[in-house]
Image (spheres, grey):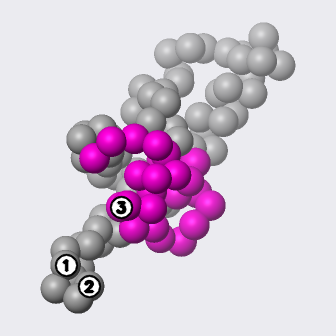
Amino acid sequence: MKNFDYKKIDEILHSRIRLAMIAVLASVAEIEFVTLKEKVGATDGNMSTHTKKLEEAGYIKVRKTFIKRKPTTFYSLSEKGRNAFKNYIKQIENMIS
C-alpha cells in the first residue's frame, strides 16, 4: 500500500447505494428518478434518503419539472461530484496497489 490513508475515503460516497448512484450519473448527462432507481436497484425511500445526502454535499444537481402534468425529477452529476468520484477511485486504487 502506497500513501493510503483510510481517513481520506469520502464518507458520502462510501455507501453502496450512493456509490452506485454516482457511478450511473458519471455515465450520463442527466437521468430521471425512476430510471436511476431501476439501475441502482433501490427502493423509493432509499433513493430519496441518498439523493438528499448527495444533493446536500453538492455532488448532484436536481431538476424538477412536470411532464404531462406529472412531477418528474432529473439528476445529474455536478463538477464537485465528478471530482469527488475521481478522487474516491484514486483512493481505492492506492489501497489496492
- Mark 2 falls on what kind of element? strand
Q: Amino acid at mark 2?
A: Ile
Q: Quadrant of residue 89?
A: top right
Q: Amino acid at mark 3?
A: Phe
- Mark 1 falls on what kind of element? strand
Give the residues drawn in magenta, as a range.
21-44
Q: Quadrant of residue 63?
A: bottom left
Labels in figure, total: 3
Q: Where residue 53 sits in the image (x, y, percent)?
A: 28, 41
Give the number of the disc on residue 67: 2
Give the number of the disc on residue 49: none
- Please say if 30 is above or below 23: below
Query: Residues under labels 3 and 2: Cα distance?
Result: 13 Å
Q: Which residue is mark 3?
A: 33
Q: Image point 56% across, 14% down: which residue?
A: 6
Outermost residue on the bottom side: it is 68
Q: Nearer the viewer, residue 45 or 89?
A: 45
